[in-house]
Every structure is written in structure tokens, then in C-alpha cells.
Image (spheres, rainbow, N blue to C red):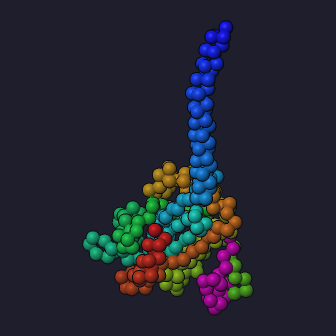
């Protein structure tokens, strides 16, 4: 009995001698793993990786082409981190560098389409847009929503004499729908130079979305529906990411929608971008 009891206690002691250090090691490494996970979680939170909204880190840079007898262009920058959407007017007669010499965006588009126009603009300013999107004014109107309205302050682009001549002397604001936009632009543009004309379209499109931010969430789905009537290099994945980005921006109270125009000078050959204009384009596309 005494011998058997001694063997039992010896076995128990040896077992504990092995198990206790092993258990301690397991507890130690489990604690280390949990601590490391907490550190990584805190670091991710500091970077904004935890609970981040889809689209919140995306930036899109597009060349928009308006298909008319004399094509027009806009640069569009959708910048979720900066919470900003920027429309930038680009005169159709903007001079761009081509292998055979200078040509204009308008002539390039008519001869070879939007892909070539995007390429030559990139060669000229040193940065390429992420994609191009080309459609008629009516199709762009469908994207914005045919029933959408906006009030445009003509005093922002016309002096009092010209406003009075056009019937906006007492009431500066014009009530617009997308279907009215082209006729409205044609009326206001009479006598404007290339820069002012390009800026005017950017201003009007900016106003539509600024006053109707809910339309941002519907633009991409409308683009999908109108795809047979558009030319674009945007892929299905691009459209999904753009949709997420616009949905994110539509919910940001601090988001801004603004417009500008590439600076340059009007010449007999076309609209020549100056140094500032090239920098503007590079910054918008960068």
C-alpha cells in the first residue's frame, strides 16, 4: 500500500511538473496574441481602416465629352478623401500635342473619337485621365434626371446690360431643367470667348448637382441604363467603385461641388493652355 501510494504521488508530481509549465506557456502566448490583436486593431482605427465606408478612399478623374457638331469637354474629378467634386471646363478648341503637330481636342475627337482625345490631352499635360465618357447632351440630361430642376444665377456670368438684354435684368435666376440647358447655354454664350463659354457649361452642370445632391446616388445606375448611347472606357468594376464613391459623397454634409476652367489664351489656331492651365489639368488628373 505504502509503495503504491508513493508511486502515485511521484507520478502526480512528475505530471504536474510537465503540465504546469506548459499551461503557463499557453496562457502567456494567448495573452501575447490577444495583445497583438488589440494593437493591430488600434493601429487600424488610427489609419481609418475600421468601419470605413465603401468609396471613402476613391478618387476618379474623367474626361467628359459632349457629343455635338462642335464637341465640348469637361474634366471631372470625384475626390472622396477631399470630399470634393470638381467640374473643369475645357474649350473644344484647346490645342493639344499630336505626332503630326498641334491639333485641337475638337478636331481630334471628330477624327478619331474620345479615346484619342484623352490620349492627346494626356500627352499635352503629362497626366492621363482614368477614363473617358462621351454622350450627347440629351443623354447627359437623362443621367441628371429629366425632371430635375436648378436655379442658375445669371449674374455670376453676365453683366447687368447683357442680363437685361436677355430678360434677366430684374430676376437674375433662371429656372432650368436638363432639357432646357442647351438652348439656355446657346443664348448666354453669344459673344463669349472660348474660356467663358467652357466655364459656363461647367457652372451649369455644377449647379444641377449642387442643388440636387441626391442625384449623385443615381448617376451610375442611369449611366448603365444609357450605356447603348454612350462611349466610355469605364469598366463594370469602375462603375461599381464610382457608384460607391458618389453614394459616400452624397451623405457628407461637408462635401462640395465646384467648377473651374483651364486657363489659357485664345489664338487663331485655337485655345492655347498657359503654364497655369497645364498645371491645373495635371493637378485635376493627378
Identify whether 256 is placed above or below 51. Answer: below
| Residue 153 found in image quarter | bottom right
Nearest to the observer: residue 231 or residue 14: 14
Nearest to the observer: residue 30 or residue 10: 10
Residue 61 lies, in percent from the top left, at 49, 64
Q: Residue at x 46, y 68 (%)?
A: 285
Nearest to the observer: residue 183 or residue 225: 225
Report if residue 142 is visible in the image.
no
Q: Residue at x 63, y 70 (%)?
A: 256
Q: Residue furthest front?
A: 2
Asked whether 85 falls inside the magenta stretch, the response is: no
Nearest to the observer: residue 249 or residue 201: 249
Q: Is residue 62 left or right of residue 243?
A: left
Residue 232 lies, in percent from the top left, at 46, 57
Q: Residue at x 62, y 42 (%)?
A: 31
Residue 109 lies, in percent from the top left, at 39, 67
Report if residue 13 is visible in the image.
yes
Quarter of the image containing the N terminus? top right
Residue 114 lies, in percent from the top left, at 41, 63
Q: Residue at x 66, y 88 (%)?
A: 164
Q: Residue furthest top?
A: 1
| Residue 139 found in image quarter | bottom right
Q: Which residues are magenta?
A: 150-168
Amino acid at each position: 500500500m505504502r509503495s503504491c501510494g508513493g508511486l502515485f504521488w511521484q507520478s502526480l508530481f512528475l505530471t504536474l511538473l510537465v503540465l504546469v509549465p506548459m499551461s503557463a506557456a499557453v496562457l502567456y502566448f494567448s495573452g501575447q496574441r490577444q495583445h497583438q490583436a488589440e494593437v493591430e486593431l488600434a493601429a487600424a482605427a488610427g489609419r481609418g481602416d475600421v468601419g470605413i465606408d465603401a468609396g471613402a478612399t476613391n478618387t476618379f478623374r474623367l474626361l467628359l465629352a459632349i457629343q455635338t457638331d462642335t464637341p465640348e469637354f469637361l474634366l471631372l474629378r470625384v475626390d472622396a478623401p477631399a470630399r470634393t467634386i470638381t467640374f473643369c471646363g475645357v474649350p473644344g478648341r484647346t490645342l493639344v500635342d499630336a505626332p503630326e503637330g498641334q491639333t485641337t481636342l475638337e478636331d481630334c475627337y471628330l477624327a478619331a473619337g474620345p479615346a484619342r482625345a484623352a490620349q492627346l490631352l494626356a500627352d499635352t499635360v503629362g497626366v492621363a485621365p482614368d477614363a473617358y465618357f462621351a454622350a450627347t447632351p440629351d443623354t447627359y440630361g437623362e443621367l441628371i434626371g429629366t425632371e430635375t430642376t436648378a436655379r442658375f444665377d445669371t449674374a455670376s456670368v453676365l453683366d447687368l446690360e447683357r442680363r437685361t438684354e436677355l430678360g434677366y435684368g430684374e430676376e437674375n435666376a433662371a429656372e432650368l431643367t436638363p432639357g432646357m440647358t442647351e438652348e439656355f447655354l446657346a443664348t448666354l454664350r453669344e459673344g463669349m470667348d472660348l474660356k467663358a463659354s467652357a466655364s459656363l457649361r461647367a457652372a451649369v452642370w455644377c449647379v444641377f448637382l449642387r442643388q440636387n445632391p441626391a442625384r449623385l446616388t443615381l448617376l451610375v445606375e442611369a449611366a448603365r441604363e444609357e450605356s447603348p448611347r454612350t462611349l466610355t472606357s469605364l469598366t463594370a468594376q469602375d462603375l461599381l467603385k464610382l457608384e460607391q464613391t458618389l453614394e459616400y459623397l452624397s451623405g457628407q454634409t461637408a462635401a462640395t461641388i465646384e467648377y473651374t476652367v483651364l486657363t489659357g489664351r485664345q489664338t487663331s489656331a485655337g485655345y492655347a493652355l498657359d503654364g497655369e492651365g497645364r498645371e491645373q489639368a495635371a493637378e485635376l488628373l493627378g
